[in-house]
Image (spheres, coloured by chain):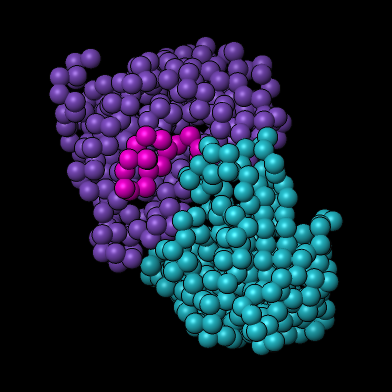
Chain colours: A purple, B cyan
Amino acid sequence: MTNMNDRPIGFIDSGVGGLTVVKEAMKQLPNENFIYLGDTARCPYGPRPKEQVIEFTWEMTHFLLEKNIKMLVIACNTATAVALDTIKDQLAIPVVGVIMPGTRAAVKATKNKRIGVIGTQGTVKSASYERAIKEKFSQIQVESLACPKFVPIVESNQFHSSVAKKIVFESLRSLKNKHLDTLILGCTHYPLLRPVIQDVMGKDVTLIDSGAETISEVSMLLDYFSIANAENKKKGYTTFYTTGSTQLFDQIAQDWLGKALAGSKQIALGGTDHAS
Amino acid sequence: MTNMNDRPIGFIDSGVGGLTVVKEAMKQLPNENFIYLGDTARCPYGPRPKEQVIEFTWEMTHFLLEKNIKMLVIACNTATAVALDTIKDQLAIPVVGVIMPGTRAAVKATKNKRIGVIGTQGTVKSASYERAIKEKFSQIQVESLACPKFVPIVESNQFHSSVAKKIVFESLRSLKNKHLDTLILGCTHYPLLRPVIQDVMGKDVTLIDSGAETISEVSMLLDYFSIANAENKKKGYTTFYTTGSTQLFDQIAQDWLGKALAGSKQIALGGTDHAS
């Protein structure tokens, strides 16, 4: 064990979605320190071209590398789908995405071998889940559906509203008669809509939130690479950065993480691109 | 994904104990191929000096490396305790031990923060579990106990006998009043004695068999390093080697793994040391 193990674990997302992964991290890894960056100003990533998502993901990554993170969690499905491999190849620290953990959990959960995947346009277009699932078990049928309206509902802090319920109902209608027993919430924003999604899909459908499974992978890799923080070292701080409104970010973070948190700090990424 | 992913995952143990880990592998990883080496002729490892265990573990490792394994599982607590770090440092393939997975499972399971660890003399002397548990949560009390009589009972295929019951009862007597709620089976042979151990400890004590947790780690690392075997590739073979009696090995393997297996092959390791 080195004395560098109290360095934070970094999390990046297009906005507030990755908080659903951080929530699990705070629960499962009480000895660790975390640093979070949500690129709210440029959210959503889902409709953006692949090359741009890769570029933005690199910008977030560089920001956190300067904060001396010891591990990077790409807590965003859209970014994982297109940027994980290249970032992992080029960094000296371990890099974890959310797609393989979600895949493993879903393959384990399904009994009737019919899995649904909902995500952003970018994630669905990448077919990352479908490919990963089929490599594990080719007999599984996968139904993928892009739900472009979900991220904006969450980012605008309307996920408790009746509008949310209506949009979720209309979006998922086409999945209802596919006899799925498992549905992957293939976007880290979606767990904030979980009660509504569960309601629409019915209680017999198992919803897979990759957060818990991703943090199991993080926990294992901390041990594997001997970089876990010991309990007696500096621990338990979480720092939040956003490229957007700190007020909206803090409201959602406090609501979702359920405790008083130090407020987020606003930062700028990628020069002039903020207005896009 | 390379086309080398149908290479087998290697398992090594001092004898038949690692079969309890292989059993979980066959269940959780149906697409993978396995190769197993049990050093039965030199079992038990528990009472041997650390240097000798390291030497024997390297001999097993070299045998499997020649079989072109893509990952090595040290499915033996005694060998993990003293040899994992050095072997992991020196191999180009991923190397997994059984102590950290068992530790994670136990820390997650305990409610009263009192964990017992039973293992060989070598494992208990190394204090590996105690150290790993305390780094995660220093307030947990750990009671360790060496049970040198257990491995010989298993290796001689007497784990169903009344003698086994008597020995387990006597060995664990001193742990009975320690108010443990969790007991780590810190030797891969011990799950074969699980019903007896559970009986002696009482049904309220959670027994941690590191096999399942270890294979979860293997599964994640296969994905992490992109070396999982795809379902449509050559899959599902398991080859067994032992340095001891193939007859006794095959009896225990068939009994424990519960299916008709190709018989094991006998091999020699380390020159003249076999008689020891």
> At x 34% / y 37%, what residue is drawn?
A87
B200 or A119, nearer to the observer: A119
Left or right relative to B193: residue A187: left
Give residue A84's position: percent from left, percent from top.
39, 35
Q: On the image, which quarter does residue B167 sit in?
A: bottom right
Give residue B77's position: percent from left, percent from top.
56, 71
User: Can residue A218 be seen at all in this image of the molecule?
Assistant: yes
Q: Quadrant of the C terminus of chain A?
A: top left
Q: Quadrant of the N terminus of chain A?
A: bottom left
Residue B78 higher or lower than A61, as above or below = below
Residue B90 higher or lower than A21, as above or below = below
Q: On the image, which quarter does residue B157 sit in?
A: bottom right
Left or right relative to A79: residue B252: right
Give residue A268's position: percent from left, percent from top.
16, 28
Give residue A204's position: percent from left, percent from top.
65, 30
Left or right relative to A121: residue B18: right
> At x 80% / y 71%, what residue is drawn?
B246
> At x 62% / y 24%, what residue is drawn?
A142
User: Can residue A182 be seen at all in this image of the molecule?
Assistant: no
